[in-house]
Amino acid sequence: MTAQTPPDARLSATILLLREGISTPEVLMVKRHYEIDFAAGALVFPGGKAAASDTDPGWDAYTDGDYGPVQQDARIAAIREAYEESGILLARHRKARGPGAPLVGADIADTLAPHRAAVDRGEIPFLDLVREHDLTLALDRLIHFGHWITPVMMPKRFDTHFYVAPAPSGQIAAHDGRETTDAVWLSASEALEQEKAGQATIIFPTRMNLVKLSRAASLEDARQRFAAEPVITVLPRPGKTETGAPCLFIPEEAGYGQTVELLSNVKV
């Protein structure tokens, strides 16, 4: 790789798990461990890089929905990462599979919880665990919400798909203690206020997607609103403001209500 060739962006997935709040939806956020090499200490949504096992053709018999290779792989990765980092499992009993079928409850999530670390380390394939318990992943519950690609000048790059999904009833979120050190439910406005007050670190794409989420007044509003909105790919472009300050530009048509971010504000 030459200095002029940016590193490839790795397929990644992030999930905004939602539940009804007092006045607006709450989203599950986890705090990244301080020794992690990306977004250390930041509040993020559960997510991470797609694994080779997420592309296993065996998943076809254990997933609901037909989305093509990239979207299927990303949705599997999103559900796997949510399970590893929070213990939340978006799955159905296979005998009851299909759109609209109920998701598994706390009993199944608790049964699978002790295997989270082994799945994370690659010691147990997630597909094997799902197959053993005769489950199917509810890919159809995920609504495509955003698509961000890391700028070309960054040493590590990710091609990240964001999804929103209602959290399964009765399941309890718990951080994993390895990649994450806390798990909290916050409204989008609460998270943004914490960052503004210096009480939380939130990276640029996360902040922008919190701003987007803050427009939803309820779970049903979020479902209808974001299912109907097109997802425009955001590849922040480096440049300078009119005053010469280094910045990133994002496309106006992406609908985030902001097109310029000063590099001095960008946390990695």
Image: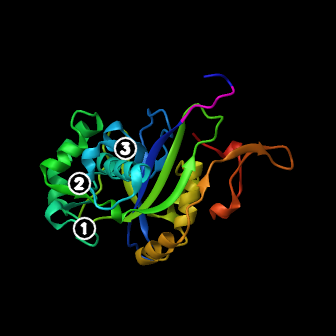
Q: Mark 3 points at which residue?
A: 181
The extreme right residue here reads 243
Q: Around disc 2, counting alpha carbons within 10 Å, would you say few (fewer than 14), some (14 to 19), or many (20 or more)?
A: many
Q: Three-letter amino acid code at disc 1?
A: Gly
Q: x, y (%) of residue 262? A: 72, 47
Q: Name the residue under label 2.
A: 62
Residue 7 lies within the magenta run: yes
Relative to residue 95, is residue 82 drawn left or right? right
| Numbered disc 2: secondary structure | helix
Q: x, y (%) of residue 235? A: 63, 48
Assess whether mark 1 and mark 3 are in contact (beta carbons under 8 angstroms). no
The extreme top residue here reads 2
Q: Name the residue under label 1.
A: 98
Q: Around disc 1, counting alpha carbons within 10 Å, would you say few (fewer than 14), some (14 to 19), or many (20 or more)?
A: some
Question: Where 211 sits versus 156, above or below?
Answer: below
Disc 2 versus disc 3: nearer the observer? 2
Q: Give the range drawn in magenta.
A: 4-8
- Mark closer to the chain start, 2 or 1: 2
Q: How far apart are marks 2 and 3 (CA)?
A: 31 Å
Q: Which of 264 and 10 is in front in this view?
A: 10
